[in-house]
Image: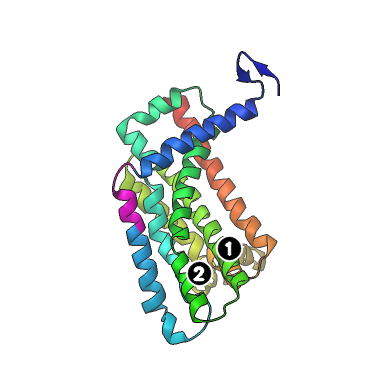
Amino acid sequence: MSRVDGQDATPYSATLRATGTIFAREFTAYFATPLAYVFLIIFLTLQGLFTFYLGQFYEREQADLSAFFAYHPWLYLFLIPAVAMRLWAEDRKAGTLELLLTLPLPAGSVVLGKYLAALAFTGLALVLTFPVWITVNWLGDPDNGVILTAYMGSFLMAAAYLAIGSAMSAVTRNQVVAFILSVAVCFLFVVSGLSMVLDVFSGWAPDALVLAVANLSFLSHFDNLQRGVLGLNDIVYFLAVIALWLWITRVIVDAKREVG
């Protein structure tokens, strides 16, 4: 590849370097305080309680992880916004966001780098649940293909929650406000496919609108993946939600850069 003044000639490589720099900075920052470890302990503890007690893992006497994945949408509803609320709000409160935005870094690299760091941390929390997978294989003969697909669906759903949380964190300098906004918006995406919500629209709205509202639900798309149905439309849905909310985050960051 040609180089100019010791630097890569392509802006694409410069963008990748900038994204990597932000990623390393943000991911390391998670473990600079005990909060990351506290979060991981809380996540794993709640996951165990939901699976083995509320989900009655042993009482069901079935070699699958449906009891494990069934509570992920509701567990993520509060835990993922707790991770996302610091993405931008903390920098704004500390006054470091203004400094960050004055650096010669593409806004997209900053947004993506911060998001990928939070996503890697979230992925680490999910990976640490592997003893549950080992347990079900020790107790029986599960369909590991279904479990792997469910894990992928859980990760995509967590990534969608996180993208929404990133945008909400960019709106305000108050982490508590960012958390509440994230929970509220994510909650709408979760319950949009429930019958009690659809009944509100079915009385007056055309069927196409009711179907569109139903298709916005995280639950319906995750349920397909949880059952081992690897549908392209479900994967595209989560990727589209992630892309949309990251784009919204960038718009908000660009607006604050111009104002600043």
Task: Give the residue at x 52% y 37%.
Answer: 250
Q: Which mark is residue 213?
A: 1
Is residue 190 in the magenta section? no
**What is the secondary structure assignment of the residue under circle 2?**
helix
Q: Residue at x 43, y 60 (%)?
A: 128
Label 1 is placed on what type of residue?
Val
Q: Nearer the viewer, residue 141 or 106?
A: 141
Q: Is residue 39 magenta?
A: yes
SS assignment at label 1: helix
Q: Residue furthest left?
A: 34
Against 29, residue 255 (above or below) is above
Q: Quadrant of residue 183?
A: bottom left
Residue 249 at x, y percent in the picture? 50, 40
Up/down of 132 relative to 167, above or below: below
Q: Is residue 111 left or right of residue 95?
A: right
Q: In the displayed structure, would residue 248 be above or below residue 3?
A: below
From the viewer's side, name the closer residue of 167 and 222.
222
Check disc 2 and give the amino acid type. Val
- Residue 197: assigned label: 2
Q: Percent x, y for residue 237? A: 62, 57
The answer to whether 1 is drawn above or below residue 141 in the figure is: above
* Other residues around mark 2 within 10 Å, as few (<14) / some (14–19) / many (≥20): some
Q: Which residues are magenta?
A: 32-40
- Please tell me which of labels 1 and 2 falls first in the chain: 2
Question: Is residue 116 at all visible to an observer of this figure?
Answer: yes
Seen at 31% across and 35% down, the residue is 93
Does residue 120 appear left or right of residue 94 in this picture?
A: right
Determine crowd level at label 1: few under 14, some 14-19, many 20+ residues with C-alpha closer than 10 A: some
